[in-house]
Amino acid sequence: MQHRPTASRVPDPGIRELFTREARWQSWLDVEAALARAEAELDMIPADAAVQIAEHCRLELLDMAQIEATLAVTAHPLVPLIWELDRILGDEIGGYVHWGATTQNITQTGDILQLRKAHEIILGQIGQILSLLAPLAERHADDPCAGRTHGQHAVPATFGYKVGAWIDELCRHVERLRDAEPRVFVAMLGGAAGTLASFGAPGLAVQEGMARHLDLLPMPVPGRTSHDHHAEYAAILAMLAATCRKIADETYTLMKPEFGEIEEPVPPGTVGSSTMPQKRNPKLSQDIRAACAQVTTLFPLALDAMRTEHEADGSTSVMIERVVHGSIELIGDILSRMAVLFEGIEVKPERMRQNLDLSGGLIMSERIMLALGERVGRQRAHDIVYEHAQDAAVQQVSFRDLLVADEEVRRHLSEAELDHLLDPASYTGACGDIARAQAQRARELVEGLDSAQS
Protein backbone atom coordinates (compact mmCIF):
# COMPACT_ATOMS: atom_id res chain seq x y z
CA MET A 1 0.00 0.00 0.00
CA GLN A 2 1.35 3.41 -0.98
CA HIS A 3 2.52 5.52 1.97
CA ARG A 4 1.07 9.01 1.90
CA PRO A 5 1.58 12.09 4.09
CA THR A 6 -0.70 12.41 7.07
CA ALA A 7 -2.30 15.46 8.65
CA SER A 8 0.06 15.20 11.63
CA ARG A 9 2.96 15.69 9.21
CA VAL A 10 1.64 18.91 7.69
CA PRO A 11 4.67 21.22 7.44
CA ASP A 12 4.78 24.58 9.20
CA PRO A 13 5.12 27.24 6.48
CA GLY A 14 6.95 29.58 8.87
CA ILE A 15 4.43 32.41 8.93
CA ARG A 16 3.66 32.44 12.65
CA GLU A 17 7.30 33.00 13.50
CA LEU A 18 7.20 36.22 11.47
CA PHE A 19 4.69 37.70 13.90
CA THR A 20 6.22 36.69 17.21
CA ARG A 21 6.98 39.55 19.56
CA GLU A 22 10.71 39.31 18.90
CA ALA A 23 10.32 39.15 15.11
CA ARG A 24 8.06 42.18 15.11
CA TRP A 25 10.47 44.08 17.39
CA GLN A 26 13.28 43.42 14.95
CA SER A 27 11.16 44.65 12.05
CA TRP A 28 10.47 47.87 13.98
CA LEU A 29 14.18 48.29 14.58
CA ASP A 30 14.73 47.82 10.84
CA VAL A 31 12.35 50.70 10.21
CA GLU A 32 14.11 52.88 12.78
CA ALA A 33 17.40 52.17 10.98
CA ALA A 34 15.90 53.08 7.61
CA LEU A 35 14.44 56.27 9.08
CA ALA A 36 17.81 57.32 10.43
CA ARG A 37 19.53 56.66 7.09
CA ALA A 38 16.90 58.69 5.20
CA GLU A 39 17.17 61.59 7.62
CA ALA A 40 20.97 61.60 7.42
CA GLU A 41 20.79 61.75 3.62
CA LEU A 42 18.73 64.93 4.00
CA ASP A 43 21.08 66.37 6.67
CA MET A 44 18.38 66.17 9.33
CA ILE A 45 20.63 64.15 11.64
CA PRO A 46 24.41 63.62 11.52
CA ALA A 47 25.61 60.91 9.16
CA ASP A 48 27.66 59.18 11.84
CA ALA A 49 24.57 59.07 14.09
CA ALA A 50 22.65 57.27 11.35
CA VAL A 51 25.47 54.76 10.94
CA GLN A 52 25.57 54.08 14.67
CA ILE A 53 21.79 53.78 14.92
CA ALA A 54 21.63 51.35 11.99
CA GLU A 55 24.45 49.22 13.40
CA HIS A 56 22.74 48.96 16.79
CA CYS A 57 19.20 48.27 15.51
CA ARG A 58 19.68 44.57 16.20
CA LEU A 59 17.59 42.94 18.85
CA GLU A 60 20.40 40.69 20.04
CA LEU A 61 22.37 43.77 21.09
CA LEU A 62 19.60 45.04 23.36
CA ASP A 63 18.87 44.07 26.95
CA MET A 64 15.66 42.03 26.66
CA ALA A 65 15.10 41.95 30.42
CA GLN A 66 15.26 45.75 30.53
CA ILE A 67 12.86 46.04 27.58
CA GLU A 68 10.37 43.72 29.25
CA ALA A 69 10.63 45.57 32.53
CA THR A 70 9.98 48.90 30.80
CA LEU A 71 7.13 47.37 28.85
CA ALA A 72 5.48 46.27 32.09
CA VAL A 73 5.64 49.84 33.41
CA THR A 74 4.83 51.86 30.27
CA ALA A 75 2.38 49.44 28.60
CA HIS A 76 3.64 50.95 25.34
CA PRO A 77 4.65 48.67 22.46
CA LEU A 78 7.55 50.73 21.08
CA VAL A 79 8.86 53.06 23.80
CA PRO A 80 10.83 50.33 25.62
CA LEU A 81 12.75 49.57 22.41
CA ILE A 82 13.48 53.25 21.79
CA TRP A 83 14.67 53.83 25.34
CA GLU A 84 16.90 50.76 25.27
CA LEU A 85 18.36 51.78 21.90
CA ASP A 86 18.95 55.27 23.27
CA ARG A 87 20.68 53.80 26.34
CA ILE A 88 23.16 51.64 24.44
CA LEU A 89 23.94 54.41 21.95
CA GLY A 90 24.52 57.04 24.62
CA ASP A 91 23.11 60.53 24.93
CA GLU A 92 24.95 62.05 21.97
CA ILE A 93 23.76 59.53 19.38
CA GLY A 94 20.69 58.13 21.14
CA GLY A 95 18.93 61.47 20.95
CA TYR A 96 18.54 61.07 17.20
CA VAL A 97 16.65 57.77 17.44
CA HIS A 98 13.01 57.95 16.27
CA TRP A 99 13.49 61.57 15.19
CA GLY A 100 10.12 63.09 14.20
CA ALA A 101 8.27 59.78 14.00
CA THR A 102 5.26 58.51 15.88
CA THR A 103 4.74 54.95 17.07
CA GLN A 104 2.29 53.86 14.36
CA ASN A 105 4.74 55.02 11.65
CA ILE A 106 7.24 52.48 12.90
CA THR A 107 5.01 49.60 13.97
CA GLN A 108 2.74 49.65 10.93
CA THR A 109 5.64 49.87 8.50
CA GLY A 110 7.54 47.15 10.35
CA ASP A 111 4.53 44.87 10.26
CA ILE A 112 4.25 45.50 6.53
CA LEU A 113 7.80 44.19 6.19
CA GLN A 114 6.75 41.00 7.95
CA LEU A 115 3.58 40.76 5.89
CA ARG A 116 5.65 40.97 2.72
CA LYS A 117 7.73 38.01 3.88
CA ALA A 118 4.55 36.08 4.62
CA HIS A 119 3.19 37.12 1.22
CA GLU A 120 6.14 35.49 -0.52
CA ILE A 121 5.57 32.30 1.47
CA ILE A 122 1.89 32.29 0.48
CA LEU A 123 2.72 32.74 -3.19
CA GLY A 124 5.20 29.87 -2.96
CA GLN A 125 2.58 27.67 -1.34
CA ILE A 126 0.02 28.41 -4.03
CA GLY A 127 2.68 27.66 -6.62
CA GLN A 128 3.32 24.30 -4.96
CA ILE A 129 -0.40 23.48 -5.03
CA LEU A 130 -0.69 24.48 -8.69
CA SER A 131 2.29 22.27 -9.52
CA LEU A 132 0.37 19.36 -7.96
CA LEU A 133 -2.95 20.21 -9.61
CA ALA A 134 -1.49 20.50 -13.12
CA PRO A 135 -0.64 16.80 -13.55
CA LEU A 136 -3.85 15.85 -11.74
CA ALA A 137 -5.89 17.78 -14.29
CA GLU A 138 -3.98 16.21 -17.18
CA ARG A 139 -4.20 12.67 -15.85
CA HIS A 140 -7.95 12.87 -15.46
CA ALA A 141 -8.72 15.26 -18.31
CA ASP A 142 -10.88 12.67 -20.05
CA ASP A 143 -12.08 10.60 -17.08
CA PRO A 144 -15.86 11.09 -17.02
CA CYS A 145 -17.71 11.87 -13.84
CA ALA A 146 -21.17 13.13 -13.04
CA GLY A 147 -21.54 16.86 -13.40
CA ARG A 148 -23.85 17.95 -10.61
CA THR A 149 -26.02 21.04 -10.29
CA HIS A 150 -28.22 21.74 -7.26
CA GLY A 151 -26.84 18.53 -5.77
CA GLN A 152 -28.29 16.40 -8.58
CA HIS A 153 -26.87 14.76 -11.72
CA ALA A 154 -26.83 17.29 -14.56
CA VAL A 155 -24.66 16.25 -17.53
CA PRO A 156 -21.36 14.36 -17.65
CA ALA A 157 -18.13 16.22 -17.00
CA THR A 158 -14.59 15.00 -16.30
CA PHE A 159 -12.63 15.06 -13.08
CA GLY A 160 -9.83 16.91 -14.89
CA TYR A 161 -12.31 19.65 -15.76
CA LYS A 162 -13.22 19.98 -12.08
CA VAL A 163 -9.53 20.33 -11.21
CA GLY A 164 -9.14 22.84 -14.05
CA ALA A 165 -11.79 25.03 -12.43
CA TRP A 166 -9.79 24.95 -9.18
CA ILE A 167 -6.62 25.92 -11.06
CA ASP A 168 -8.39 28.79 -12.80
CA GLU A 169 -9.62 30.27 -9.53
CA LEU A 170 -6.29 29.87 -7.72
CA CYS A 171 -4.48 31.55 -10.62
CA ARG A 172 -6.78 34.55 -10.34
CA HIS A 173 -5.97 34.81 -6.64
CA VAL A 174 -2.26 34.90 -7.50
CA GLU A 175 -3.01 37.72 -9.95
CA ARG A 176 -4.93 39.59 -7.25
CA LEU A 177 -2.11 39.17 -4.74
CA ARG A 178 0.44 40.42 -7.27
CA ASP A 179 -1.74 43.34 -8.37
CA ALA A 180 -2.18 44.46 -4.75
CA GLU A 181 1.54 44.59 -3.98
CA PRO A 182 2.16 48.28 -4.83
CA ARG A 183 -0.86 49.32 -2.76
CA VAL A 184 -0.21 47.05 0.23
CA PHE A 185 3.56 47.10 0.69
CA VAL A 186 3.98 50.75 1.56
CA ALA A 187 5.93 52.68 4.18
CA MET A 188 3.98 55.16 6.29
CA LEU A 189 5.82 58.11 7.86
CA GLY A 190 3.61 61.08 8.61
CA GLY A 191 4.34 61.93 12.20
CA ALA A 192 1.70 62.47 14.87
CA ALA A 193 -1.27 63.24 12.60
CA GLY A 194 0.12 62.40 9.16
CA THR A 195 1.02 66.01 8.38
CA LEU A 196 4.84 65.46 8.34
CA ALA A 197 5.23 68.73 10.26
CA SER A 198 7.80 67.19 12.60
CA PHE A 199 10.13 66.61 9.64
CA GLY A 200 9.93 70.13 8.26
CA ALA A 201 10.08 70.90 4.55
CA PRO A 202 11.75 67.61 3.52
CA GLY A 203 8.96 65.55 5.12
CA LEU A 204 7.79 63.70 2.01
CA ALA A 205 11.40 63.15 0.97
CA VAL A 206 12.14 61.55 4.35
CA GLN A 207 9.27 59.11 3.87
CA GLU A 208 10.43 58.37 0.33
CA GLY A 209 13.98 57.72 1.54
CA MET A 210 12.85 55.48 4.38
CA ALA A 211 10.65 53.52 1.98
CA ARG A 212 13.54 53.14 -0.48
CA HIS A 213 15.83 51.72 2.21
CA LEU A 214 13.12 49.18 3.07
CA ASP A 215 12.36 48.38 -0.59
CA LEU A 216 8.81 49.63 -0.12
CA LEU A 217 6.79 52.37 -1.78
CA PRO A 218 5.88 55.52 0.18
CA MET A 219 2.24 56.20 1.04
CA PRO A 220 0.98 59.10 -1.08
CA VAL A 221 -0.94 60.37 1.95
CA PRO A 222 0.74 59.01 5.10
CA GLY A 223 -2.42 59.23 7.19
CA ARG A 224 -2.78 57.04 10.23
CA THR A 225 -6.46 56.49 9.47
CA SER A 226 -5.93 54.66 6.17
CA HIS A 227 -6.45 50.92 6.45
CA ASP A 228 -7.99 50.25 3.05
CA HIS A 229 -4.77 48.63 1.81
CA HIS A 230 -4.86 46.26 4.77
CA ALA A 231 -8.53 45.58 4.12
CA GLU A 232 -7.85 44.88 0.46
CA TYR A 233 -5.25 42.30 1.39
CA ALA A 234 -7.57 40.75 3.97
CA ALA A 235 -10.28 40.57 1.30
CA ILE A 236 -7.99 38.66 -1.06
CA LEU A 237 -7.04 36.28 1.74
CA ALA A 238 -10.73 35.76 2.52
CA MET A 239 -11.45 35.03 -1.16
CA LEU A 240 -8.53 32.62 -1.28
CA ALA A 241 -9.90 30.92 1.83
CA ALA A 242 -13.34 30.69 0.22
CA THR A 243 -11.82 28.93 -2.80
CA CYS A 244 -9.92 26.52 -0.56
CA ARG A 245 -13.13 25.90 1.39
CA LYS A 246 -14.95 25.07 -1.84
CA ILE A 247 -12.25 22.59 -2.86
CA ALA A 248 -12.20 21.04 0.62
CA ASP A 249 -16.00 20.79 0.60
CA GLU A 250 -15.84 18.94 -2.71
CA THR A 251 -13.18 16.49 -1.52
CA TYR A 252 -15.07 15.99 1.74
CA THR A 253 -18.27 15.18 -0.16
CA LEU A 254 -16.73 12.99 -2.86
CA MET A 255 -14.95 10.97 -0.16
CA LYS A 256 -18.26 9.95 1.43
CA PRO A 257 -18.91 6.21 0.89
CA GLU A 258 -22.08 7.07 -1.02
CA PHE A 259 -19.88 8.83 -3.60
CA GLY A 260 -16.50 7.13 -3.17
CA GLU A 261 -14.98 8.98 -6.10
CA ILE A 262 -11.83 10.24 -4.39
CA GLU A 263 -9.97 9.70 -1.14
CA GLU A 264 -7.65 12.08 0.63
CA PRO A 265 -4.41 10.67 2.09
CA VAL A 266 -5.19 8.17 4.86
CA PRO A 267 -1.88 6.47 5.67
CA PRO A 268 -1.66 3.06 7.33
CA GLY A 269 -2.09 3.35 11.07
CA THR A 270 -4.27 6.47 10.95
CA VAL A 271 -7.05 6.18 13.53
CA GLY A 272 -10.35 7.79 12.58
CA SER A 273 -12.33 6.89 15.67
CA SER A 274 -11.75 5.50 19.14
CA THR A 275 -14.88 3.34 18.85
CA MET A 276 -15.40 2.71 15.11
CA PRO A 277 -12.40 0.90 13.63
CA GLN A 278 -13.62 1.27 10.05
CA LYS A 279 -13.46 5.09 9.99
CA ARG A 280 -11.29 6.73 7.31
CA ASN A 281 -12.06 10.32 8.11
CA PRO A 282 -11.29 13.30 5.83
CA LYS A 283 -9.08 14.98 8.41
CA LEU A 284 -7.28 17.29 6.00
CA SER A 285 -10.51 18.49 4.40
CA GLN A 286 -12.13 19.03 7.78
CA ASP A 287 -9.19 21.07 9.06
CA ILE A 288 -9.12 23.14 5.88
CA ARG A 289 -12.84 23.87 6.11
CA ALA A 290 -12.58 24.92 9.76
CA ALA A 291 -9.63 27.24 9.15
CA CYS A 292 -11.24 28.76 6.04
CA ALA A 293 -14.36 29.61 8.01
CA GLN A 294 -12.23 31.50 10.50
CA VAL A 295 -10.53 33.54 7.76
CA THR A 296 -13.78 34.54 6.06
CA THR A 297 -15.36 35.53 9.37
CA LEU A 298 -12.35 37.72 10.22
CA PHE A 299 -12.70 39.85 7.09
CA PRO A 300 -15.74 41.97 8.16
CA LEU A 301 -13.60 43.27 11.03
CA ALA A 302 -11.25 44.77 8.42
CA LEU A 303 -14.12 46.83 7.02
CA ASP A 304 -14.93 48.04 10.52
CA ALA A 305 -11.28 49.01 10.99
CA MET A 306 -11.49 51.34 8.00
CA ARG A 307 -13.88 53.56 9.97
CA THR A 308 -11.13 55.35 11.87
CA GLU A 309 -11.99 58.52 13.76
CA HIS A 310 -10.31 61.86 12.96
CA GLU A 311 -6.54 61.49 12.29
CA ALA A 312 -5.81 58.41 14.39
CA ASP A 313 -7.61 55.81 16.46
CA GLY A 314 -5.66 53.11 18.24
CA SER A 315 -8.61 50.73 18.41
CA THR A 316 -8.78 50.33 14.65
CA SER A 317 -5.05 49.60 14.48
CA VAL A 318 -5.58 46.75 16.93
CA MET A 319 -8.51 45.49 14.86
CA ILE A 320 -6.67 45.48 11.54
CA GLU A 321 -3.64 43.83 13.12
CA ARG A 322 -5.87 41.03 14.40
CA VAL A 323 -7.41 40.55 10.96
CA VAL A 324 -4.23 40.58 8.89
CA HIS A 325 -2.01 38.58 11.23
CA GLY A 326 -4.74 36.08 12.03
CA SER A 327 -5.81 35.63 8.43
CA ILE A 328 -2.37 35.12 6.94
CA GLU A 329 -1.33 32.67 9.66
CA LEU A 330 -4.47 30.62 9.00
CA ILE A 331 -3.96 30.83 5.23
CA GLY A 332 -0.48 29.39 5.67
CA ASP A 333 -1.96 26.44 7.57
CA ILE A 334 -4.70 25.98 4.98
CA LEU A 335 -2.30 25.94 2.04
CA SER A 336 0.04 23.52 3.82
CA ARG A 337 -2.85 21.11 4.21
CA MET A 338 -3.96 21.65 0.62
CA ALA A 339 -0.50 20.64 -0.57
CA VAL A 340 -0.52 17.46 1.53
CA LEU A 341 -4.03 16.69 0.27
CA PHE A 342 -3.03 16.87 -3.38
CA GLU A 343 0.30 15.13 -2.89
CA GLY A 344 -1.58 11.98 -1.89
CA ILE A 345 -5.12 12.25 -3.26
CA GLU A 346 -6.48 9.05 -4.78
CA VAL A 347 -8.90 9.43 -7.69
CA LYS A 348 -11.21 6.53 -8.55
CA PRO A 349 -12.38 6.74 -12.19
CA GLU A 350 -14.12 3.35 -12.00
CA ARG A 351 -16.37 4.56 -9.18
CA MET A 352 -17.06 7.77 -11.08
CA ARG A 353 -18.22 5.69 -14.01
CA GLN A 354 -20.45 3.60 -11.76
CA ASN A 355 -22.02 6.76 -10.35
CA LEU A 356 -22.67 8.04 -13.87
CA ASP A 357 -24.83 4.97 -14.44
CA LEU A 358 -26.83 5.34 -11.22
CA SER A 359 -29.71 7.08 -12.95
CA GLY A 360 -29.97 4.51 -15.74
CA GLY A 361 -29.08 7.00 -18.46
CA LEU A 362 -31.14 9.94 -17.20
CA ILE A 363 -27.96 12.05 -17.04
CA MET A 364 -28.00 11.91 -20.87
CA SER A 365 -31.47 13.43 -21.23
CA GLU A 366 -30.12 16.69 -22.63
CA ARG A 367 -28.23 14.89 -25.36
CA ILE A 368 -31.24 12.76 -26.30
CA MET A 369 -33.41 15.87 -26.40
CA LEU A 370 -31.00 17.74 -28.69
CA ALA A 371 -30.58 14.79 -31.05
CA LEU A 372 -34.33 14.26 -31.23
CA GLY A 373 -34.88 18.01 -31.50
CA GLU A 374 -32.96 18.08 -34.79
CA ARG A 375 -35.80 15.95 -36.21
CA VAL A 376 -38.93 17.15 -34.40
CA GLY A 377 -37.96 20.54 -32.98
CA ARG A 378 -36.49 21.36 -29.61
CA GLN A 379 -39.70 21.98 -27.67
CA ARG A 380 -41.45 18.85 -28.92
CA ALA A 381 -38.31 16.84 -28.14
CA HIS A 382 -38.15 18.35 -24.65
CA ASP A 383 -41.76 17.32 -23.98
CA ILE A 384 -41.14 13.75 -25.12
CA VAL A 385 -37.91 13.28 -23.20
CA TYR A 386 -39.27 15.07 -20.13
CA GLU A 387 -42.23 12.70 -19.93
CA HIS A 388 -40.07 9.58 -20.18
CA ALA A 389 -37.41 10.96 -17.82
CA GLN A 390 -39.97 11.73 -15.13
CA ASP A 391 -41.62 8.32 -15.55
CA ALA A 392 -38.25 6.60 -15.29
CA ALA A 393 -37.38 8.53 -12.11
CA VAL A 394 -40.74 8.11 -10.39
CA GLN A 395 -41.60 4.57 -11.50
CA GLN A 396 -38.00 3.34 -11.35
CA VAL A 397 -38.15 1.85 -14.82
CA SER A 398 -35.52 1.90 -17.56
CA PHE A 399 -35.17 5.25 -19.30
CA ARG A 400 -33.74 3.51 -22.33
CA ASP A 401 -36.64 1.06 -22.50
CA LEU A 402 -39.16 3.89 -22.35
CA LEU A 403 -37.41 5.68 -25.21
CA VAL A 404 -37.20 2.53 -27.33
CA ALA A 405 -40.89 1.83 -26.72
CA ASP A 406 -41.92 5.29 -27.93
CA GLU A 407 -42.91 5.07 -31.61
CA GLU A 408 -42.12 8.71 -32.32
CA VAL A 409 -38.65 8.38 -30.82
CA ARG A 410 -38.03 5.10 -32.63
CA ARG A 411 -39.11 6.70 -35.90
CA HIS A 412 -36.23 9.18 -35.67
CA LEU A 413 -33.58 7.42 -33.57
CA SER A 414 -32.53 3.79 -33.91
CA GLU A 415 -31.63 1.66 -30.91
CA ALA A 416 -27.98 1.83 -31.96
CA GLU A 417 -28.17 5.62 -32.08
CA LEU A 418 -29.84 5.72 -28.69
CA ASP A 419 -27.17 3.50 -27.17
CA HIS A 420 -24.48 5.83 -28.50
CA LEU A 421 -26.34 8.90 -27.26
CA LEU A 422 -26.71 7.31 -23.83
CA ASP A 423 -22.95 6.85 -23.42
CA PRO A 424 -21.80 9.52 -20.91
CA ALA A 425 -18.12 9.17 -21.84
CA SER A 426 -18.86 10.57 -25.30
CA TYR A 427 -20.65 13.68 -24.02
CA THR A 428 -18.11 15.64 -22.01
CA GLY A 429 -17.80 18.56 -24.39
CA ALA A 430 -14.65 20.66 -24.03
CA CYS A 431 -13.82 19.29 -20.57
CA GLY A 432 -10.62 17.56 -21.67
CA ASP A 433 -9.34 20.58 -23.59
CA ILE A 434 -10.13 22.91 -20.68
CA ALA A 435 -8.36 20.62 -18.20
CA ARG A 436 -5.21 20.44 -20.33
CA ALA A 437 -5.23 24.18 -20.98
CA GLN A 438 -5.51 24.93 -17.26
CA ALA A 439 -2.71 22.48 -16.48
CA GLN A 440 -0.47 24.40 -18.87
CA ARG A 441 -1.59 27.71 -17.36
CA ALA A 442 -0.72 26.45 -13.89
CA ARG A 443 2.78 25.46 -15.02
CA GLU A 444 3.37 28.83 -16.66
CA LEU A 445 2.23 30.69 -13.57
CA VAL A 446 4.47 28.58 -11.35
CA GLU A 447 7.42 29.33 -13.61
CA GLY A 448 6.63 33.03 -13.31
CA LEU A 449 6.47 32.80 -9.53
CA ASP A 450 9.75 30.92 -9.37
CA SER A 451 11.42 33.53 -11.58
CA ALA A 452 10.09 36.39 -9.48
CA GLN A 453 11.25 34.83 -6.20
CA SER A 454 14.69 33.76 -7.42
Image: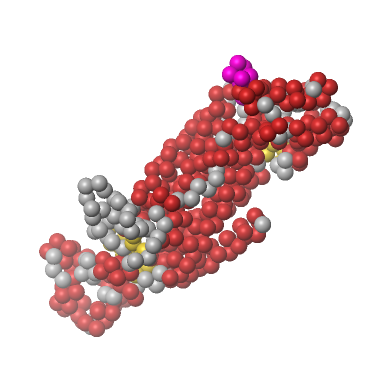
* Vertical side of 83 occupied by 209: above or below: below
What residue occupies the far top of the structure in this picture? 73
Nearest the viewer among 48 and 40 is 48
* Vertical side of 438 occupied by 423: above or below: below
Q: In x, y percent, where is residue 375?
A: 29, 77
Q: Residue 214 sits in which quadrant?
A: top right
Is residue 74 rendered magenta in the image? yes
The residue shown at (63%, 19%) is: 70
Give the dominant element type of the magenta stretch: helix, strand or loop: helix
Q: Which quadrant, please, contains the C terminus?
A: bottom right
Q: In x, y percent, where is residue 82?
A: 70, 24
Q: Give the range drawn in magenta.
A: 69-77
Q: Is residue 102 in view from this perspective?
A: no
Specify whether 86 is left or right of 385: right
Nearest the viewer among 250 and 423 is 250
Specify whether 187 is left or right of 45: left
